[in-house]
Image (cartoon, helix red, strand yellow):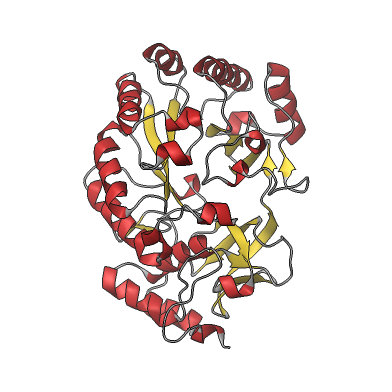
Amino acid sequence: MLRNELKDGGNKMYNKFGAKMIGCFNEYEDLSKKYNLPISEIILMDLNRCGIYLPNNEVRVDFRVRFKAQILNSYNSWYALPVRNEEDTPFKAQNNKIYLLNNEIGNFDELRLDTCESSYQRGPHLLNLNSRSRSNCGGCKACVHNYHDFYDSTVIRDNTPLKTGDDINTFFDQKKIDVEKLVQIAVVTGLFHGEKNVLEHMNLVNKVAKSRGFNGELMYFGCEVNSIDALKNLAAIDNFKLIYALDNFTKRDSLLAKTKSLITLDKAKETLNNAKNLGIKTTISYIAGIDELKELGNGFILLKDSFTTFPIINIYQIQNSNQASILNEEARDLEYYILARMFLEKLFEGSKMKPKRWENYRPLWYDYYENEKVLDNSYGQLEKVKKLVK
């Protein structure tokens, strides 16, 4: 069967995790015209939704691969994608080329297994610290780290704790990180089990980094700091940012770890407003694909005035059947993500807040926001892109 004729009795086929797959390039073209969106944006959303096939088996199926790629003349950026069997995605990466329906659409390098690491850099000046072992975290059903029998020692590589000043200094030295040149240190990690532990760690990271010349943004990605006194403590740190990890707006009691499930949207809004009033930069992280579109909209309408920067919105990526079971029925279709994107652009219209591509490996936005370039890179117009894939 030709890959550009992937059909089943005239209906779209589903991959093994329940996502409806695009069968031919004309479907992307139709969506581009229907929603007046650049076709490259739609294709890149679908890539993050569907994952990628690796004919050379560099990474095992259902694990995640990370690589740097330039696709459809888009910004040269990192991607982190679930690895699929050939029949479960229209995308393929082989011999440094990216293919859509067997047509070359880009190139990649630095392909690697996406591991649980103590940290990783999103570029020479952006550092993520995984201080509290994500692989030992659990309870959130959308997260692959909840399923402790899924990964093995080839993936679990975050066993080195960063708890003391010596730990952090040793880490910087071993990784040869020029801390003075970093523009952001983001603590993105598992649960600290209490806001006191978060405060101690964030102040420790700040102290060690400052001693090495750091003057950038220090960011905490989590939901364990909620009291006004704790927020005042964090507000005393120069250039601090809070990304409140909400993940999803509905079914929170059944889908999230207990600590997170007890946080209502109203409580999150209160925390964000208090932080904002104290001068802390604020936003949330959210996974698109779990809530129905109506509830996605209601949640963002409630919370948006408590943000100082655009929310971090990830396309839901699935690596096992347990994760697949909580995919929203509407989110089986690519149009769900297009509609979510359009709603959010309308909601934040006039706010001057826009997504930053480097903040997110699996976003709803790539080169364009409100049909204007948001990044300093070129986009091939429809005819140019069509030549690449036809």
Residue 367 point in image, percent of width and height: 41, 59
The residue positioned 52% from the left and 65% from the top of the image is: 50
Residue 77 point in image, percent of width and height: 54, 56
Number of marks in picture: 0
Residue in front for this viewpoint, 59 or 139: 139
Say left or right for 389 vs 117.
left
Residue 272 point in image, percent of width and height: 34, 27
Residue 386 lies in quadrant: bottom left
Residue in front for this viewpoint, 249 or 104: 249
> Which residue extends farthest top?
229
Whether residue 157 is situated above or below residue 81 in the rendered picture: above
The residue positioned 44% from the left and 62% from the top of the image is: 45
> Which residue extends farthest front?
254
The residue positioned 56% from the left and 67% from the top of the image is: 16
Whether residue 142 is situated above or below residue 184 in the rendered picture: below
Whether residue 176 is situated above or below residue 156 in the rendered picture: above
Q: Is residue 220 visible?
A: no
> Which residue extends farthest left?
350
Q: Is residue 75 visible?
A: yes
Say left or right for 138 vs 284.
right
Residue 75 point in image, percent of width and height: 49, 59
Residue in front for this viewpoint, 198 or 121: 198
Q: Point out the image quarter for the N terminus.
A: bottom right
